[in-house]
Image (cartoon, rainbow, N blue to C red):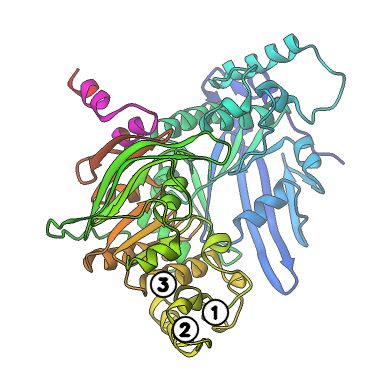
Amino acid sequence: MAAHFCLVNDWPDKIIQGEDGMAEQAKETYAIECKKITKKFGTVIANDEIDLNVRYGEILALLGENGSGKTTLMNMLSGIYHPDGGQIYIGGQAVKINSPVDAMNLGIGMIHQHFKLVEAFRAMDNIVLGTKGKKEKAKVTSEKIKAISETYGLEIEPEKYVSDMSVSEKQTVEILKVLYKGAEILILDEPTAVLTPQETEKLFHILRKMKARGCAIIIITHKLQEVLSISDRVTILRKGKSIETVDTASCDARKLTELMVGRPVSLEIERPVMPDCETILKVVDLSVQKADGSVAIDDISFEIKKGEILGVAGVAGSGQKELCETIAGLLQAQKGAILFHKENLLGKTPSEIIEKGVSMSFVPEDRLGMGLVASMGMTDNMLLKSYQKGKGPFISRKPAKELAERLIEKLDISTPGTETPVRLLSGGNVQKVLLGREIESSPAVLITAYPVRGLDINSSYTVYDLLNEQKKKNVAVMYIGEDLDVLLELSDRIMVLCHGKITGIVDAAKATKEEIGMLMTGETAEDTIGKEEA
């Protein structure tokens, strides 16, 4: 028998008592209840008898390290996978969710970290895409979208094309998509990963409105301060098991971390103070185009000193990727100069940069696409960095194997052996392999693009420690990051990019998240200072 559920728009009459009051019925009813959910992939148990529940009118945060089973569990709730054991209840009734269509019919909508939108379509077209029934007139559809938007404070232009939207606007379209289809249970996967602090607060305001009107919300995020800010309860998963569900009000970041990892973990990021050193890398009037001819980097200038970590912040697509690849010699610039001491590297390939005697290491965003060869083991991936230094026609694998073994011990890399293909390792271990290889070449300049993206807390703090070790060795480090809290703690200065331009370079020890957020939206440092003085 199909589960009974109310559409979101029915909630005000059926459950809400006044605009802000929630009826006892809503408080007592579980929107979703998972009992002993099990999912296996071959011999691997991804979910091991997991229990989870979320009430109507509640925000539940789901926490866990990489491989803890969060994604697998949510994929079962959204109909992508089917459980091998256990039972899912929606609104108190047992259900089987065999497809995303089943999930939507049960009022479940999932908003993925990587949006599922058609860029060439308008917002309105994307919202109604996949709905069944008689085709409505555009005016009627637009009015329905407007009504839902006003109910939850969602600001969107129905006629605007997705290709012309900001990341925040695209996320709003995704939320409207599931609400338009009648979802009352929302699952959000890393919803703030690419948002500014201001956009994040706006999203949280919307989620609180949805909660007040009876929606059940599950949010997956690795940002502990956001968990503490937005959620009512937190369910922690570890190695495929549900460890505990706690009231958010009774927790702090340290307790949540201990529950995730299973032991105490220091959340302190060191920022060693180094003596004022000379500039080692200077970028002057640099302009770079994307493959389609549009501007990626627009006439920017900055410098990095020895023993400094320069953080780079910006909304996704602001030119971070192109900047890294241009400095590393992988992308050609249209104009400008990249000076290593006084040697201009502009237009030089990576091989030519090495031949010039420039010691530079690059940890790219795409670890297995650009950084490592996925089908190779650690030994051969070590060789990729050093084989050109060999003399004669033959390559000795012995030094590379010794380096791989040394990195396994030093960085606690979990791998069956040095010949195991790196694609079989977890994301954290892959990143340790790549970063370890790059820093072992004793670089003078280290460029890292999103080095902790997708990593668990343990692996992330290992990376921060490695970067600080390089800083203490007088290496100039450029750190492209997404988490502003980390950027503010780890960096000495933060350079903010917006649409390929530098909107400000600030002292990380004195800057605030709000200031960085304003710069990320395009306001210059002068604009921000002017507002503060006003």
Hey, which quadrant is residue 48 in on the image?
Answer: bottom right
262 vs 182, left or right, is left
Disc 3 versus disc 2: distance between alpha carbons?
12 Å
Residue drawn at (56%, 41%) of the image: 291
Query: Observer-nearest residue: 515 or 315?
Result: 315
Disc 3 versus disc 1: distance between alpha carbons?
14 Å
Residue 400 tag number: 2
- 174 lies above or below 451: above
Disc 1 versus disc 2: distance between alpha carbons?
7 Å
> In which quadrant of the rendered image does the C terminus lie?
top left
Residue drawn at (26%, 26%) of the image: 528
Residue drawn at (55%, 37%) of the image: 58
Residue 380 tag number: 1
Residue 47 tag number: none
Residue 436 tag number: 3
Magenta region, residue range? 515-530
Residue 31 located within the stretch drawn in magenta: no
Q: Nearer the viewer, mark 3 or mark 1?
A: 1
Tell me the SS state at disc 1: helix
The answer to whether the residue labelled 1 contacts the one labelled 2, judged by CB atoms less than 8 Å apart, is yes
Residue drawn at (50%, 89%) of the image: 396
**Can residue 246 be seen at all in this image of the molecule?**
yes
Three-letter amino acid code at the position of disc 1: Asp
